[in-house]
Image (cartoon, grey):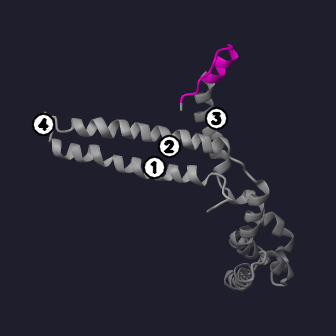
Amino acid sequence: AMPYKRNPMRSERCCALSRHLICLVQDPLMTASTQWMERTLDDSANRRISLPEAFLTADIILSTLQNISEGLVVYPKVIERRVNQELPFMASENIIMAMVKAGGDRQECHEQIRVLSQEAGRVVKQEGGDNDLMDRIRKSDYFKPIHSQLDALLDPGTFTGRAPRQVTKFIEMEVTPSLQKYMDKLKEGGKVELQV
């Protein structure tokens, strides 16, 4: 049904099993709610089923996700095209701020860019065309004071916030130390079995 997708069945299996795993949490909660700290054995049948099933379900979810992610292919050109389609709309607030810094009236600037954004949005949504908001801004005499700044205002890196630093910190503080014991074993010439 979806020949253009690479891993639809495995991804959907992970979603389905994840929902199942979430529901398994109810078993011990219901059992605990009726135990009242008494020494009864009515939880044993439930535990013999729910606990192993939860661990087995979690195991197959992780194994399948590992299988999917190891074959992950990233298409930078597709990402770039998508970002370039949305970036002009995202940058509209920065353009307004730049105009205000250049002496423009915020309300008037907002109205000017709102009109141009709506026109560009119509081209994208109704005609299936590319986002031409920046062309419209470059042609507008109103935005002439910041024409030289437009490329800098459209730098995708200015929209990522702290994400690059957070990823670097996570890799340095969590991932690298976790992998280090396996790297040390490899350096010693030993066989490494990754436990997932």
Kind of residue at badge 2: Ile
Q: Calculate the distance from the C-alpha at mark 2 to the C-alpha at mark 4.
A: 35 Å
Q: CA distance from mark 2 to mark 1?
A: 7 Å
Lower sequence index among marks 4 and 1: 1
How many numbered marks have been drawn onto this rendered protein structure?
Answer: 4
Q: Which mark's residue is nearer the viewer, 4 or 1?
A: 1
Residue stretch rendered in magenta on the structure:
182-195
Residue at position x 13%, y 33% from top? 39
Disc number lying in front (3 or 1): 1
**What residue did someone put label 1 on?**
18
Identify the mark at residue 38; answer none if there is no mark.
4
| Pointer 2 or 4: first along the chain | 4
| Dot 2 and dot 1 residues touching (CB under 8 Å) | yes
Return the mark for residue 61. Answer: 2
User: Which is nearer the N-term, disc 2 or disc 1?
Assistant: 1
Q: Is residue 189 magenta?
A: yes
Relative to 17, say whether 60 is above or below.
Answer: above
Q: What whole-number distance in Å separates the C-alpha atoms at marks 3 and 1?
A: 29 Å
Where residue 58 appears, as percent x and y from the top left, is 45, 40
Viewer-side label of 4, 3: 4
**Does label 3 or label 1 sit earlier along the sequence?**
1
Q: Secondary structure at mark 3?
A: helix
